[in-house]
Amino acid sequence: MVSNAPSFPTQSDVKKARALRRVKALATAALALCVLVFVLCRIYADVSPVIGFIGAFAEAAAIGGLADWYAVVALFRHPLGLPIPHTAIIPSNQTRIADNLGSFIESNFLAPEPVRKKLQQVDFAALVADWLADEKRSEGLSIFVARLMPKMLAAMENTGLRGFLLKRVTDQLEKIDVAPIAADLLATFTHERRHQRLFDEMIGLLGGFLTDEDAQDALRDRIRKELPTLANFFRADAYLLKKILHSGASLIEDIKADDDHPMRHEFDRFVARFIDNLRHSPEYRDRAEELKRNLLARPELATLADGLWKEVRGFIDRDVGAAESMLRTHLTGIFVEVGRSLADDANIRRDMNEGFVVALSSFVESQKSGVSSFISEQVRSWDLGQLTQVIELNIGRDLQYIRFNGMAIGGLAGIALHTIDVLFLS
């Protein structure tokens, strides 16, 4: 049988074996002494009545010592090598001992309440915080994580996970009602009339259009087409263009110079109506949803996502192999900051510890039957001789003292019986 027992002998086992041999020798010597005294007392019984008491003590002590020697030896082997029934108890019951040991550990050491109480004594969050707060450890962790990232990204591509994630993101975007979100964003943007900056940009663009020669030529051609031929003969188009450009430029300058211009208030009202329609108008909501669906359905979006994925993966591949990796540096900083923040926040540590206790106790509860089976299988697979030796080394020394106790108790019982015999039966 292949032994799965611990390696033997260890330094501790050598010391235990030496102590066991010493106690065995003393117990055997004491037993031999009792036998010798008994024999001598038999020979010199007539010398003195006291000899009878000593002989009674020695006789009973020898009997007690022999009985206890038999009991101790019978636990581990057959006494004198004789196959006496109900001896070599431990080797003969290896399977039962293994099963009972596994069940005992499962029932008493892996019960839910003791496990939870023991786990609650450990501050797991503090251990994590101290570990992460050490910059060298966090740096090592960041190196490990950075090395894994390219493999993780490659695995995502090979398993189709990237496409799955893109589809999940798209599905979630389709469920979002964009009109109220857009309304909230615009309302935030228009806070304290910040949208007037946009209006100023629009006015600036219009002013640039009016001063652009190509735009002026296009406007002149449009005016010429709308005027009668006779008006064009008198160059009315040039006059009208000049008036339009002058009036437009004057209006733009007035708007730029006056923060309280009516056109600005009109723009305020337009933006407010648009925000209100986004929030409450079904028509605007339908238009926003249609725009969203059209945008998500465009093939350019998938192309953009694919290109973005390739860029991210390429950057990570290059950065991980660089001597001065930005990714590793940032990860190290993040881990250290997490450790320090965790050390300063008792509430988070308490919540984390509760989570650790629940998770670990649940794991132990789900696996304790496996632990019991594992212990039982390991003990059953041990070599019988080695199993016996391991048990005897650990408890044999204490068992040898039973022999001393047996001789002492037997001797006292012998004296008591001899006294009764002398006083009442002789």
Image (cartoon, helix red, strand yellow):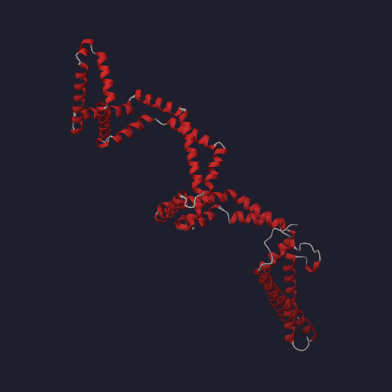
**Residue 147 percent coordinates (x, y):** 53, 49
User: What is the quadrant of the N terminus in the image?
Assistant: bottom right
Q: Nearer the viewer, residue 57 or 162?
A: 162
**Residue 98 percent coordinates (x, y):** 68, 56
Position of 417 with respect to 217 (left or right) is: right
Q: Nearer the viewer, residue 75 or 239?
A: 239
**Residue 86 percent coordinates (x, y):** 76, 62
Q: Residue at x 69, y 75 (%)?
A: 23
Q: Which image quadrant is residue 412 in?
A: bottom right
The outermost residue toward the right is 82
The outermost residue toward the bottom is 47
Q: Is residue 206 visible?
A: yes
**Residue 219 percent coordinates (x, y):** 26, 20
Q: Residue at x 19, y 14 (%)?
A: 234
Q: Which image quadrant is residue 71 in?
A: bottom right
Q: Residue at x 48, y 44 (%)?
A: 315
Position of 110 with respect to 334 (left or right) is: right
Is the residue 385 above or below the residue 348 in the image?
A: below
User: What is the quadrant of the C terminus in the image?
Assistant: bottom right
